[in-house]
Structures are given as C-alpha cells and as structure tokens.
Image: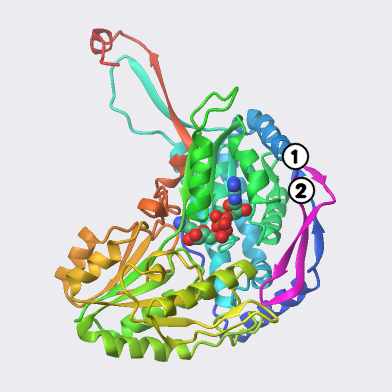
Amino acid sequence: MPTEFRNEPFTDFSKEENAQAMRAALEKVSGELGGEYPLVIGGERIKTGDTLDSINPANRTQIVGKFHKATKELASKAVETAAEAFKTWRNVPAAERAQLIFRVAELMRTRKHEFSAWMIYEVAKTWPEADGDTAEAIDFLEFYGREMLRYAGDQPLVKLQGEDNRLDYIPLGVGAVIPPWNFPCAIMAGMTAAAIATGNTVVLKPSSDAPAIAYKFFELLEEAGLPPGVVNFMTGSGAEVGDVVVDHPQTRFVAFTGSMEVGLRINERAAKKQPGQLWIKRVVAEMGGKDAIVVADDADLDEAATGIVQSAFGYQGQKCSACSRAIIDARIYDPMVEKIAERTAKIKLGDPTDNGNNMSAVINEKAFKSINGYIEKGKAEGGRVVAGGGSDGERGFFIEPTVIADVKAGSTIEQEEIFGPVLAVIKADDYDDALRIANDTQFGLTGAVYSADEAKLDRARNEFHVGNLYLNRKCTGALVGVHPFGGFNMSGTDSKAGGRDYLLLFMQAKLSSEKVGATSKRAEAGTAS
Ligand code: NAD
C-alpha cells in the first residue's frame, strides 16, 4: 500500500539552491523551444504537415513549439484506436494501473522545475504559479492512484445469507479529455490520470495554447510504461477535431474543463445519439466563473484587501476561481477601495522568467483584445479606474492589474467572465445586499466572505451558492484532497476534482450476485427489482 496522501510542497524560491535549480531548468527548456511535435495515435507518431504554433505570450515572436494538426479522419482514428486499446487496458488490474500512475508522479517530481519552466514559457506563469501548477499535477496523480485502490477494494453491501454479493467499479470506455490552457499541467494531467487509473482509454486533445506541456506529460506516460493506444495525443483546432471526437459513436464520455460556451456545446452534441452508438455519453464539464469576495463591515480590512488582490491577480486573473468581483459593505467601501488600489499598484508586471515579477502577460491576442474591451466597457458603464487600466501588446500581451470601482450590480463587467486581470468593485447597501449581488450571476464556482461575525459566516454557508466557499481567506488556491473543486449552475457539473467522488464519474458500478450454500428465504421471496 502506498503511504497516506500528502500534498506536494511548494518550492521556496527564496532559497538559493531552489532558485538555481529553476534557472537551470529555464535554460534547459529555452534550448528546446521551437521544436516540432507529432500526433501520437496508437504509439505511431504522425505528421500531417499542417501545423499550429504555440507561442510565448510574454514574447510573442518566440515559438515554443510547432504542433501537427489532426485531420477529421485522424481524429476518428484516434477514437477507434482508443476503443481497440480499451479491450485490453480494461482488464489490467487496478493495482497495476495505480502503480503506473504513481510512477508518472515520481517521474514528474524528479523533473518538477522542467515542467514549471515549460509553463513559464508557454503560458506565461510566474515561478510560484508554475510551481503550484506542477505540484497540483503531482497531487492529482498521487491522489487518484490511491483513490483507484480504494474503489478496487471490497465495497460495503448489506449481507444476505446464501448469496455472495459484490459491487465492482468498472471503466466506461473511450474518453475525450479536453483541458483548458490555464492549468495546462494540473488539469490536463488530472483528467487524464483519472480516466486511465479507472481503466478507460483516452483521446487527449490539449488546448492549442498549451500543447507543449501536454506533450511532455504524454512522454512521461510512455516512459512509465503506458501501453500504446491507451492515451492518444491529438492536437488540432478544438472546433474542428473537437466536434469529431465528441460526436464519435465510440466515444463513451467527455471530460472537459474550459469555457461555458464550449462546455454547453459539448454537452448538447454529446446528448445526440449517433448511428451505432450504444450508450448515453457521460459529460463532465467544468466551466467558467464570476467569483466574488464579500467584505462585511466588521471584517479585518487589511486581510480582506490582501486576499482580494491575491485572488484577483494571481496568474493575471486567469483562474476559473479568480476573484473578479469585490462586493463591499457601504460602511467600509472607501477605505477598502483605497487598500485594494494600494496593494494592486505594488504588483510588478513583466517577463515571467524573472522571479522578481509577480504578474505577466495574458494568454493570447484574442484574450488581450477581449480583456481590454471589458476595461473600456467598464468605464463606459460608469466605472472608475483606481489602479492600472493600461496595456502594452508590443512584445507580449501585457495588461496592467486593473481595479474598476463603483461598478453597478448587473452591469456587463459585473456579470460576464472576463478571465483577465480586471477586478470590479461593487458597493453593497449592507450584508444582505452583498450576498444578493454575489449570488446574482449565472455562475457558482468559488466565493469568499470576510467577516468577524460567525453568524454572518454561517449565513454565507447557507446562502452563498458556490461550489467552493472560503471564509476569511482568499478564493483561489484549492488543494487536492483538502478542497475538492467544482462549481454549481453554469460553472459546471460540480465534479469536485481532487475529491473522493471524482473517480466515480469515470466508472460504472456492476453488481454480481452469486447463489451459494443453503438457499435464502428472503432471496426467494422476491424483491422489487
Ligand atoms: P475553452 O472553452 O476555449 O477551451 C477549452 C478546451 O476546449 C480547449 O482544449 C479547446 O481547444 C477545446 N475546444 C474548443 N472548442 C471545442 C469543441 N467544439 N469541441 C471540443 N473541444 C473544443 O476554454 P479555455 O480558454 O481553454 O479556458 C478558460 C476557461 O476555462 C474559463 O472559462 C475558465 O473559467 C474555465 N476553467 C474552469 C475550471 C473549472 O474547474 N471550473 C478550471 C479551469 C478553467
């Protein structure tokens, strides 16, 4: 049995040996930038000649990697290859599958800084943000490996004399694993590991903004001994080949994390029975958020301001859990706006390879334009920019951490997910009003409340409708096993990644009942079903 699960510690970069190790990893990875990567289907490396470039958002002319794009035919072939591999992988004992996942975790641990360095170049994460992402990936591997062993053990059933009853969790089949770019290691590795630990096979279609990290992970799987075809690596346009994989009749489930728009599209398409399809496809869709931190009039204002700024601007506000709304009781509104603006002004924006910077570029040009559009919209709708507001798209996609005060509840930037470094500050009449505003969006992912009053916190527990609620702490930074993560309403299917229920989404329970020894009267009397 493996030891009890423990979260992977974050690296302390104030220690010179750790900083040195990261600098060495950055140098190594910088020498590998610009490489060309194939699709891998059934272990076969395939080049289509039609490539997409993954670029460094902080240095837009730097190509991180060139990735061959799948055609529709290859996307279908990937599903069919995974279906073939399922015939054998489903019979590999759970303990062996778990061991493989543990080996992958160990390999990643030994190359931790290298994985982080890829993220620093490919998605402009700062050192601590990249380190957190790699640590979370290792956590998912370690956690799901152990979870599989738990589910493979005896499941408690009511005893009935004369029968040997068992409940076994069996895999579903072929899964399309479709991750976002914002946790390109953790979420990608987590969804893939959950699928294969439970005995499924996978078509992994990484985000076109972060394929290099996914390829590096795929190589670890191969190195750890994963048989060909169990995971098939397929890059290409989400809209084009994504639809093919989702629609394919041999696809049994889709594990998706990304925007609401794409999640809903997948859910709708997956619901349609295709010719030859034998099952109702299962869709796990974790989607966007419009997360709020409520500050009551009795809160510790300094703590609240620090928590808000950290949650709003960590990884440029590009976390689904990021605080994009600070909802402040009118009695403390002015000092809070001042404290938030002060702390925001201290954030250093720049190249993520330099550990002196605490924020960097947003992911791509489309995001750069869309986020700037939201800043303009916020101003046009009466908002007052109290910090940041500027941007520079010359070298990379840099947008200053921006705080817009006096945002009206119900206005565009209070309602829509911006997914960038923009915080809307909203004045609430009182605590009742603040909770009402907090709940008044279509999302329900994370939220936080700062208050010294236990009764107010209890009300939030009861009334603040989010999957992950934090009290007197920031609303980002969920830890695997500690804070199972997933949202309500249009934030998704509340799959609670990193929790004890998660693997159930990748399996189905089979009951077998064998008559043994003397016949049981109760068994013969018949039951309802
Ligand atoms: P996105 O929806 O644009 O893309 C997600 C993935 O879907 C990518 O791999 C993309 O290529 C693919 N895709 C696009 N069109 C597709 C189609 N038609 N069929 C199949 N796949 C398709 O999201 P993104 O920009 O990569 O990520 C940001 C979003 O993800 C934000 O909305 C954020 O809130 C959300 N997110 C949610 C969570 C969560 O746990 N709830 C975690 C991280 C990110």
Q: Which quarter of the picture shows residue 94?
A: top right
Residue toward you, 365 or 343: 365
Q: Earlier in the sequence, mark 1 or mark 2?
A: 2
**Residue placed at 54% from the left, 53% from the top?**
190
Q: Looking at this view, name the residue that lies furthest to the left.
A: 455
Start-end of magenta stretch: 41-70
Residue designated by label 1: 74
Left or right: 182 as drawn, with respect to 224 = left
Residue type at mark 1: give it: Leu
Say few, some or many: other residues with alpha carbon within 10 Å of mark 2 (under 14 / 14 to 19 / 20 or more).
many
Residue 254 appears at what percent x and percent y? 54, 41
Magenta stretch prevailing secondary structure? strand
Residue type at mark 2: give it: Leu
Q: CA distance from mark 1 to mark 2?
A: 9 Å
Q: Say whether residue 173 is visible.
A: yes
Q: Say whether residue 2 is visible.
A: no
**Residue placed at 72% from the left, 78% from the top?**
24
Q: Which mark is residue 39?
A: 2
Name the secondary structure under disc 2.
strand
